[in-house]
Structure formats: C-alpha cells, structure tokens
Amino acid sequence: MSETESLSELPLNKSNTTKSVSSEIPIEIEIVSEEEMALLEAALAFASVPANASAICSPLRGFHGKARSIQSITVVSKRTFSGHTEPDIEDSGNFATTQKKNKNNESFLHRFRKNKGLSVTDITSTEWCEKQMEFVLLHAKRRTNKAMKTGSARHAKLEEEVVKKVKVQVKSKEDTWALKFLNFIIGANQLLFEGLTRELPIIGFAEGVWMVGVIDEIRIPATETDRNPILVDTKTRVRDTLPAEPQRRNGRLQLMCYKYIWDNLVADNFPSQKFFDFFTLNPYSVLSEELRERTADSGFPADTLDDIVRLYRNTCSILPPAHDQLLLRYEFQKDNSLLGEDHFAFDSDWLKNQIHGCLEFWLGEREACYTPEEERWKCRFCQFASICPTNNGLDSTPSPTNTGPDSTPHKHELE
C-alpha cells in the first residue's frame, strides 16, 4: 500500500516549484517538572517508532541572522535561569556499572534502528538518561498532553513562515528515501538563494553509523566576509524561565550533532553504496510516476533513487561548512516572547566523546548507565521510575525549577 507524504513548494517568485519531504518526531529533552517529563516521554516514544508523514519546504521570504563569536547566554527579558545549577554529566565520572552485555544478544541499534538509522533524538535521549532510553526501546508506551501539542503547533507555525506543503503518494521505501533527499535539496537551495531555511532533513554517515535528523533552522549571516551557515534551534518553555544546565547541555549536544553531520556531508563523506546496503535499498528502482513528476517540476528531474542520491551529494558539495558558533533560542510558550539566547562554540572533542559513549550503549558494548546522583531529580518525573532499580534511593531534593511546567519538547526528527 502507498503512503501519503507531505511536500512543500518553492517560493512563488521562482520559475520552478519544488517539493520535498521531512519526517516529524519530537526530540526536545528539556523537562524538569512532572508535566514536562511527560512531554519528554512522548518525544522519546516518537523516537522509537517509524514516522509516516513528511513535509516539503519552500522559501517564502529572505532572512539573515547575525553570528556571535563568543559563548554566551543572552537574557532578553527580566526572566532568569532556573536557580539550581547542575554539574555537567560529562564531568561526573563513573556513576553506574558498565559491565559488558552478553554478546549473543542483538544490539539496540540492530534491533530498533536497522531500517531507520540512529536519529539525533536517540543521541540526546541517551545522554539525558540511558536507562530511560532502554525502557523506551523495550516498552515504548508513552503519553502526550496539551503542552506538547502547543509546542508542536508553534514549531509548525515557524515552519509555515517559509514552507508550503503539498501531498504526494509514495509506493516503496525507495520513494520514501528519495523524498527525504529531495526535501534536503530543496531546503539547501532555499538557504543559498533566500538566506534561510527551516525543518531541513539531514542524512549522513558519522562515527561508523548512519545518522538522521531535522535541523530547526539554518541562516546565512548577513555579512560579506562570513557565509558559513548558522545552525539554530528554537525551544519553547511552559515557564518563563531559562533552563538549568542539564537541559542546556542537551540542547548543545543536539546542535553539535547537526553540525557534525552537515560538515561530513559537505566534505563529500557520504558512501552511497554503504547507504543502499545498510537500508536494503535498490538504487535503480524506478520512482513512482507522481514522484518523478514532482522532481521534474521542482527542477531536479530524477528517475531512480540513485539519481536522487547523486543530486543530494552534488548539492552538499556546493555548501560551505556550518559556522562554529551555534545558537539555541528559548521562547515563552504563552506569548512566544524570546526568553533568551545561548550562543556557544562547537566542541569537536566533547561531541565525539558523547557520541562514542552513546554508541557503546546502542551497539551493546555495555549495560545502560543510570543518571548521575546530582541529576536524580529527573527520576521523579520518569514514567519508568517504579521499575527502575535506581528509584530505591530517590529522595525529595527539589528539581532545578522547583515545581510547575518548565519546557516543552516540540522538535521533530527524521526517522
């Protein structure tokens, strides 16, 4: 049976109308209250099941953002950070037993991501709590709520400012992947011509595994000398406070992953044959008639998945590396006002250490670690607290933001 995918059109002032695809899966992990932990669980649930919907982006207007050269967090209102400061998880040392798994067991990567690749959601969720990620994979029963839907609606609205979606039928997994690549091609062209794109699906090979994601926003700086794209992620918050360090750290990890994948792509590090083999795809499978018509209308005619992959690689080859300065934006969900911005620098060594630690878990090289003692406040809001061994020592220490809603996951990952 065919699946319905969403496509988006190019700007009306251009001669060609293009269409592409992006899947949507919430990935934010900035939860510090009971309501917000429920939202995180919903996001994790989406990360554990395949997504059917896709979206096509089209530039509707130009936009230019300014880069920051130093790491800083700018508060643009009287609102402040959460009062409790949490140490970085990477500095907390060994906080759980890391014994080797039985080699006869299949790894989580092979069991749950063989046909999808590892998403940036998976990486950030694993950094948040490996044990929770394990429970999500094994049980995958999650709930959502009104705050989650509100955050997703805000995200969709931001996308609609530059995207017009249409529907297209896909009849094979080759069609589905072709649409994802086409969405990237369209979004990249939008970035080059308009200076801004949003919800850009990205597929790359890094650290020996296939990784996928959807970048919130990419801007070209409005300067003559600096044309490296700036990667941006916007996070909505239920409370009018900025997040504590564990949430900020997780957001930084997310954006650094995107930059790492992006830079690998523009360096032409995309082994096409490995891609076809890993996902069991026929590169010469003829795309559906409707999809071939869409690619032709978009100005990127292609008959097979191999044609689309070649266009994808060619598009990546003309893109510059992403800017070393990355930007996290925090909005108050009630009125969409800007709470603050976190400008920070890409740290390659830190990122690789995080990814390698994550892959040890996903590749079955060790058991899942528990969240460190100083961040055990997360456990009080975890759906699996009652069956998690660490719950025995749970105390009543207040969370960084005390009580009440704090932030809402709204990001969508390509699966």
Image (cartoon, rainbow, N blue to C red):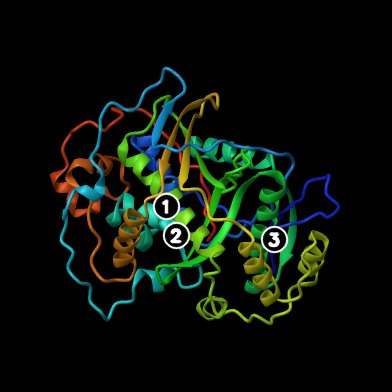
Write down the residue under mark 3. Answer: 4
Report which quarter residue 122 is drawn in: bottom left
> What residue occupies the far left of the structure in this picture?
393
Look at label 2 and name its amino acid.
Answer: Ser
Write down the residue under mark 1. Answer: 44
Question: Going from the N terminus, do you reach mark 1 or mark 3 first?
Answer: 3
Across and down, in percent, residue 56 comes to 69, 53
The reply to whether discs 1 and 2 touch (Cβ–Cβ < 8 Å) is yes
Q: CA distance from mark 2 to mark 3?
A: 21 Å
Please determine whether, in this image, residue 354 is positioned above or below residue 334: below
Look at label 1 and name its amino acid.
Answer: Leu
Across and down, in percent, residue 171 comes to 70, 71
Write down the residue under mark 2. Answer: 48
Q: Is residue 197 left or right of residue 15?
A: left
Callout 2: few (<14), some (14-19), or many (20+) C-alpha neighbours within 10 Å? Answer: many
Q: Is residue 212 visible?
A: no
Across and down, in percent, residue 170 comes to 70, 67
Which residue is painted at 48% across and 40% down in the image?
Answer: 327
Callout 1: few (<14), some (14-19), or many (20+) C-alpha neighbours within 10 Å? Answer: many
Which residue is painted at 76% across and 51% down in the image?
Answer: 9
